[in-house]
Image (cartoon, helix red, strand yellow):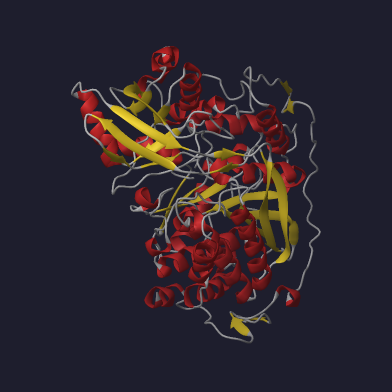
Amino acid sequence: MSSNCEDIRKQRNGAERLSRFTKGSVGCGRGRVKTKGKRSCAAVTGVQPSAWRNRKSGSKLHSQETVLRGVRLQSVIEFRCPEGVRRKRMRRVLAVAGVGFCLGGAWTARADNRLAPKGPDEDGTKPALVKIAGEGMMDSHAFQYLTELSDDIGSRVTGSPAERKAEEWGAAKMKAIGLENVHTEKYQLWRGWTRGMAQGELLEPIRRPLHVDAMGWTGSTPAGGAEGEVVTANLFDIDEEVKNASRLSGKIVLVVTEGAPKKNEDSLFAIFGDFLKAAGKAGAVAVIGGQAGSKASGMNLTHTGILGFDADFAIPVLSMTAEDQGQLERYVENGKKVRVRFNVQNTFSSGPVESANVVGEIRGRESPEQVLVVGAHLDSWDLSAGATDNGTGSASVLGSAEAIVRSGMRPRRTIRFVLFTGEEEGLDGSFAYMKQHQSEMANHLGNLVLDEGQGPVKEFMLGGRDDLLASFRPFAQSLSAIRKIHVNDKVASGTDTLPFSMAGLPGINMDQDSPEYKYTHHSSADALEAVKPEVLAENATLMALTAYWIADRPERFASPWPAEKTAKMLRAQHQYEMLKAFHIWPFGDLGAEGRE
């Protein structure tokens, strides 16, 4: 899902490297390894977790005060929710609020960010990282995992039988790799949805087929189809379009972008749902709008997707190929009458459906109660196999876990590997994780996610945590023999890092250089052929190295920020309007000083 909110913005505008990385360090092989006079009994390959020593330290975090029914920071904060917000959204806001937003004076355990920046050479993690790099780069099974997921299971819409099969597959792979405490964590999706047929035909001014697919969780035409005259609606003036929706009765609405936008792209994405409801209420036949009014990328592809957080719409909403949509736009611009016929048949479940996150761990040797989450989403859309969104991420999670296990190294703190589901429907799986683990959040270090397609990692986005830049950059520099990776403090709002950033934790997005992702994203081209095995192995290795370094540093990497500081950060990162529009902003007026 990670590029969903980026579409409008985009519309506008081995071996040698491994030897360099390991130079002057221990090599790969079985047996004892001698490094600077110290000996390690861990085997470099083939060691299972049962052979590891599990030592607990006496370190202790300060206790936290959990505040129920409200929000507490230094004082009580009042929630005000917009009229008509469904109970599900309120439960989500309150649940996530209980994680980090609703804690009073609780975050007394803080990472000491005044320490001088240290890379792996200085903090003692390099010998372990070298072993992990060897396993990841020279014996990766990540592409094998991706092949199984893509070819043997295929598309994995949340709540579908195929997605449940993927959950079972993911748990079996985690057990085979040797992870501990492997299990699934169930939650409910508000409503299930199954795609049916989607057919389009241009009737006037000429007659020919049109290539369309339905957007996720949208409705159907009457049986046999419906036709209408095409009229346009301007996404960049969406408020006026909502007010004047009565003119859309009996029409097929073609969403266009004219002039300058009056809102930022995230806000446009959020309010697009209000427009769809207004159009449906007015009696429009269908909307040609893609994901929040975005146009397909070309190559005769359509792109599906959700249109909000936990959002469904009775009106049919369609993605049309850029080539067909461009022709309709030209006809309308030239004053020609355009008539189109659609037959769209989708199915909703009668009530909630069950899904589950898949979880496995490498338990920490000293402070196992402290947890770093390493994740990607297992679910996908259904126009193809979901190889790049996000089979590559899921395969990287498994590949990174395998590299660490086979290295025989156990970090100071626990690494929890999670294959989230429900990401495509509004980050449902990661929000469910926050709710189910809210009592543990004071002990969480953050999360690390890969969800940007098929390209190599190009930057670490630290989820608004500018206090971590100085400590993270030396680590990123140490990876330069594999890949030059930049570091910034941006928030990734379209993937499973967002709930962690909202909790004041570093939601670290491993951003990728994936220029072809605009074609594979949510499209019929999202297939295994788009992925290079060597790039996938490299990404899985980088994920393993990053996870281990964060979990094994002598000093704790990060602790949650208090609510007010988190709210200020999210406002500064331009997340406020989008979160508020989707009714998942939990901070009230916090952080609003000096801002509108």
User: Residue 448's x, y, as percent?
Assistant: 56, 53
Q: Is residue 27 above or below residue 464?
A: below
Tag count? 0
Q: Residue lying furthest left in this view? A: 334
454 displayed left or right of 358: left
Task: Give the quarter of the image for residue 361.
Answer: bottom right
18 displayed left or right of 567: left
Front in this rendered view, residue 163 or 15: 163
Q: Residue at x 49, y 50 (%)?
A: 382
Q: Is residue 366 above or below residue 344?
A: below
User: Residue 465's x, y, as percent?
Assistant: 54, 42
Q: Residue at x 46, y 19 (%)?
A: 283
53 displayed left or right of 290: right
Q: Is residue 48 above or below residue 519?
A: below
182 displayed left or right of 577: right
User: Residue 459's x, y, as percent?
Assistant: 43, 52
Q: Residue at x 68, y 33 (%)?
A: 101
Task: Give the quarter of the image for residue 326.
Answer: top left
Q: Tell me if I can see residue 496 in this picture.
A: no
Q: Residue lying furthest bottom in this view? A: 31
Q: Is residue 71 above or below residue 428?
A: above
Q: Residue lying furthest front in this view? A: 224
Front in this rendered view, residue 12 or 69: 12
